Image (cartoon, helix red, strand yellow):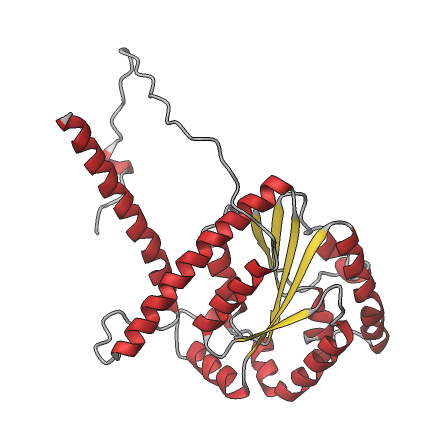
Amino acid sequence: MQEKSSIDAMHLLKLREDLLDSIDEELELAFDDGFNENNSTASNEEKKARANYFRELLRLQGELVKLQDWVVATKQKVVILFEGRDAAGKGGVIKRITQRLNPRVCRVTALPAPNDRERTQWYFQRYVTHLPAAGEIVLFDRSWYNRAGVERVMGFCTEDEYEEFFRTVPEFEKMLLRSGIVLLKYWFSITDDEQHARFLGRIHDPLKQWKLSPMDLESRRLWEDYTRAKETMIERTHIPEAPWWVVQAVDKKRARLNCIDHLLSQFNYHETEHPEVALPARVRNPDYLRHPVPSEMIVPEKY
């Protein structure tokens, strides 16, 4: 009996370590946002808000796992588009959505600029190949709306191609819905000053400079052109069947929580029952002998 109690205590300790490691995953991402755990100047209100953010995020991520299981069990097909200006925070919320999910169920699609062959195809063709099968969720980090944004502003499409996009996209999205796909469209909205501050942050942070491309810098100069393009895009593609949802994203943490909470509210999901899992006993063969690993193959334990 004493041995069983000892084993139970060991298991509880391991479970606690796993939970703390899970929380640390989010802390690692938080450092990417400039979070300083040892910041002694943080007020009690700031510390309380930070703790509440972590608590709510972990709760919402637990709900995302339930949603994932429901999508698999009911063979749903889900597409979620994330659009917004450069540095609006799309990548941050996508990281938090996918952080606890099965990559075989929930995957991210972030397509590069079309190659020469793709430029001769039907515009939507290269996006269609990434649409989900039953039991899958696909998050588009930018989507077919590139034509209404960067391609329009930077002159990468003709006026005829631009107008054809607006004629086609409502029908294309209605076709997706008729095929059984659930489609959600999010626009992450930030202010002029906030984008300016985030760009400066990337310029002066060696770990984030890779996020800035020449196209990003040009988008900063053309803020007003992008604003007009965004307004036209939403006006002409905000349809009852597939409306746009605008996320106020100046505060990154609030934007993530609000977006995930809203995303969950769009599904009438429920917790899926799973058969009880029993860990089988390991087979032990008396003639099995584990060979030692050669010392030159072992990674040095510096930490």
Query: Quick one: 57 or 17, which is closer to the camera?
Result: 57
| 244 shown above or below 65 | below
Q: Residue at x 66, y 82 (%)?
A: 226
Q: Is residue 156 left or right of residue 251?
A: right
**Residue sticking out furthest to the left:** 2
Q: Residue at x 60, y 76 (%)?
A: 215
| 27 shown above or below 295 | below
Q: Picture coordinates of residue 300 (x, y %)? A: 23, 45
Q: Residue at x 62, y 43 (%)?
A: 135
Q: Is residue 232 left or right of residue 260?
A: right
Q: Quadrant of the N terminus?
A: top left
Q: Is residue 86 left or right of residue 224?
A: left
Q: Quadrant of residue 206?
A: bottom left
Q: Residue at x 65, y 53 (%)?
A: 78
- Residue 65 visible in the displayed image: yes
- Residue 35 visible in the displayed image: no
| 147 shown above or below 71 | below
**Residue sticking out furthest to the top:** 287
Q: Picture coordinates of residue 71 (x, y %)? A: 60, 46
| 270 shown above or below 41 | above
Query: Quick one: 273 or 277, which is closer to the camera?
Result: 273
